[in-house]
Image (cartoon, rainbow, N blue to C red):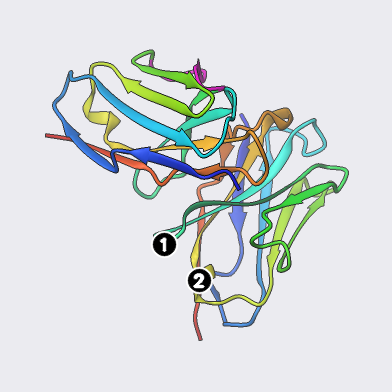
Amino acid sequence: DIQMTQSPSSLSASVRDTVTITCQASQDISNYLNWYQQKPGKAPKLLIYDASKLETGVPSRFTGGGFGTHFTLTIYSLQPEDIATYYCQQFGDLPRTFGPGTKVDIK
Amino acid sequence: QVQLQESGPGLVKPSGTLSLTCAVSGVSISSGDWWTWVRQSPGRGLEWIGEIYHTGRTNYNPSLKRRVTVSVDRSKNQFSLNLNSVTAADTAVYFCARDPANTGRFDFWGQGVLVTVSS
């Protein structure tokens, strides 16, 4: 299986800060990487697909980047509604695997 | 609008079989999409269980393959999950989701159902 790691595991930032989350794959997955946002008690919500493409309806302050084994999710101008846990997920191979998550809260 | 809704028992006895159904609305299950089960627990995080195409073709997580079956009922526009020989480690929130056209992403999800394995 392709192992996914994320850092940091949690972070606290102020409103309007820029926040960056990193995701690393255990092998080259090209751009086969998605990002999700999950709020407590809810299903994950797709934010970014194919490493850098913004899902319809997602605010443009969310940006994805990276290729190969190293990927980033950046939230520009953090908003209170962005409090959530963020997960990366690879689809370079089966089984699909997810990162352990990064919990984001507001200072 | 695509909607998915899980249903099934919230409590299963150890060594029993966990059975869940995902009702799909807003799109035909016979479209070019794949239909997926994912579970989430504090210990395992988000774990992909398996997927099915409307023809019945399936892919499973090797870690669960011996115990899992995913099936589709095109007449009811729904798909199902069976997981047998369950233990406490199978206690989790189970989600169904759509993978549009086998793109590898999950764009629509059910709200999730908590299944507890306990006697």
Residue tagged by mark 1?
A: B43
Q: What stretch is highlighted in magenta?
A: A50-59
CA separation in Å, label 2 and label 1: 9 Å
Closer to the camera in the image, B8 or B35: B35
Spot occupied by residue B14 in the image (x, y as percentages of width and height): 57, 82
Give the SS element for disc 1.
Answer: loop
Label 1: chain? B
Residue tagged by mark 2?
A: B89
First in sequence: mark 2 vs mark 1: 1
Asked if residue B50 is among those painted magenta in the image, a careful observer would answer no
Residues packed near mark 2 inside 10 Å, few (<14), some (14 to 19) or many (20 plus): few
Residue drawn at (49%, 81%), measured in percent from left and top?
A: B118
Closer to the camera in the image, A12 or A78: A12
Q: In which quarter of the image is the N terminus of chain B?
A: top right
Above or below, A42 against A17 in this view is: below
Residue drawn at (41%, 47%), measured in percent from left and top?
A: A100
Q: Quadrant of residue A80?
A: top left
The main secondary structure of the magenta stretch is loop
Above or below, B5 against A61 in this view is: below
Residue drawn at (44%, 34%), measured in percent from left and top?
A: A24
